[in-house]
Image (cartoon, rainbow, N blue to C red):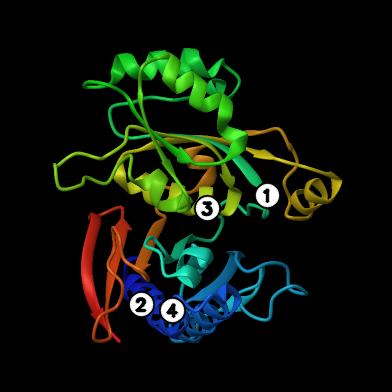
Amino acid sequence: MKALTPYVERACAHAALACQPWVGQGDKDAADAAAVEAMRARFADAPMKGRIVIGEGERDEAPMLYIGEAVGGGEGPAVDIAVDPLEGTTLAAEGRPGALCVAAFAPRGGLLHAPDVYMQKLVVGPGFTVDADDLDRPLIEVLKRLSAQAQDRLRVVMLDRPRHAAIVQAVEAVGADLCRIDEGDVMGALQTCLPDQSGRPPFDAYIGSGGAPEGVLAAAGLQALGGSMVGRLLFRDDAERGRAEALGIGDLNQAYSLDDLASAQARLVLAGVTGEILAGPVDRKVDVLTIAPESGATRQLISV
C-alpha cells in the first residue's frame, strides 16, 4: 500500500487544482465533475488492480468513479478505493473554506462498501473509549462518561442540522463545549485526533448523523491516528434499504466498529480546495495531508 500512496496523493492534488476555475462560481456540479475527471485520469497511472467501492454513485448514475469501476494500470496489488472527489461541493461553489478532495484505499476487502445513506456516528480521539453499545445507550449517559475521561471540559463537534436538536440538549446538559459546523463531515471527525496549533486536537468527540461514505473515509484516517469510532446505517425508506442489500449488507441494524469500517492497513489522502485546515492551491502547489499506518499524519505541498 505504501508504494501506491504517491499516486493517490497526486490524484487528489490534480482533482483539487482541476476544480479551481469553478470555485465561487455557484455551480457545484461543474466543480464536482472537474474533480472527478482529474482524479480518475490520475488513478490510471497507478500500478494496481483498483476497485471503486465508494464513489459517485451506481454505474447508471455516474460516468466515472462509479461503484464497482476498475481503476489503475491493471497490474499490482488488489486495492479497494473510496473517494469523495469534492467533499463540500457547496463550499466550493460558494467559495467558502473547507472543501477537500478525498480518497481512502486499502487491500481488497479493507473498506466497508457503504451505501449512500446516513450513518449514526460516534467518534472520539485518543484517550477516550466508545463501543457498539453506546449507539443504544442514552446519549447523556455516554457524554457523562466521556466527560470523566476528558482533560478538562469535553469538546464536542457536530454538523449543524435540525435533526441534531436532541444532541445539542444533551451536550448542554452535561456542561460540555459544542462546536457546530456547516459542512465537512470527514474533517470534523478527524479533528478529534489531528492536533491544531495548541498541540492537541480541537475536539474530543464528533457526534451525530452524516453520510455513510464519509464515515468510511474518516475511519480510514482514524485507524492511523489512534481514534475510535462506532456507527450504524440509517435508512429513510425501502429504496435505501434495498441499496444496502445490493451491496451485500445483510444485517441492516449492525453496529460497526472502526475495524468494521476500515482495516488497520487503510490510508487516507486529503487535498485542500478552498482553504481552512488545508490551504487551497497556489501557483499550482496543492496542500496535501496523508494519513498512513507507518507515519501517522504528514503534510506536504505537491506541484501539479
The amino acid on which the numbered mark 2 sits, given as a three-letter code, is Ala
Contact check, label 3 and label 2, Cβ < 8 Å: no
CA distance for labels 4 and 1: 24 Å
- Is disc 1 placed on a helix, strand or loop? loop
Instruction: Answer with mark 1 or mark 3, whichever residue precedes in sequence.
Output: 1
Quadrant where the C terminus lies? Answer: bottom left
Name the residue carrying label 2.
13
Name the residue carrying label 4.
15
- Is disc 4 placed on a helix, strand or loop? helix
CA distance for labels 1 and 3: 10 Å
In the rendered image of this protein, does residue 138 appear above or below residue 294?
above
Name the residue carrying label 3.
214
- Image coordinates of residue 62 in percent, x first then y, are 69, 75
In the rendered image of this protein, does residue 156 appear above or below residue 111?
above
Out of 263 and 61, give the one closest to the viewer: 61
Is residue 76 among what the camera can see? yes
Name the residue carrying label 1.
117
- Image coordinates of residue 263 in percent, x first then y, are 46, 48
**Could you tell me which residue is drawn at 33 percent across and 35 percent down?**
125
Contact check, label 2 and label 4, Cβ < 8 Å: yes
The amino acid on which the numbered mark 3 sits, given as a three-letter code, is Glu
- Is disc 2 placed on a helix, strand or loop? helix
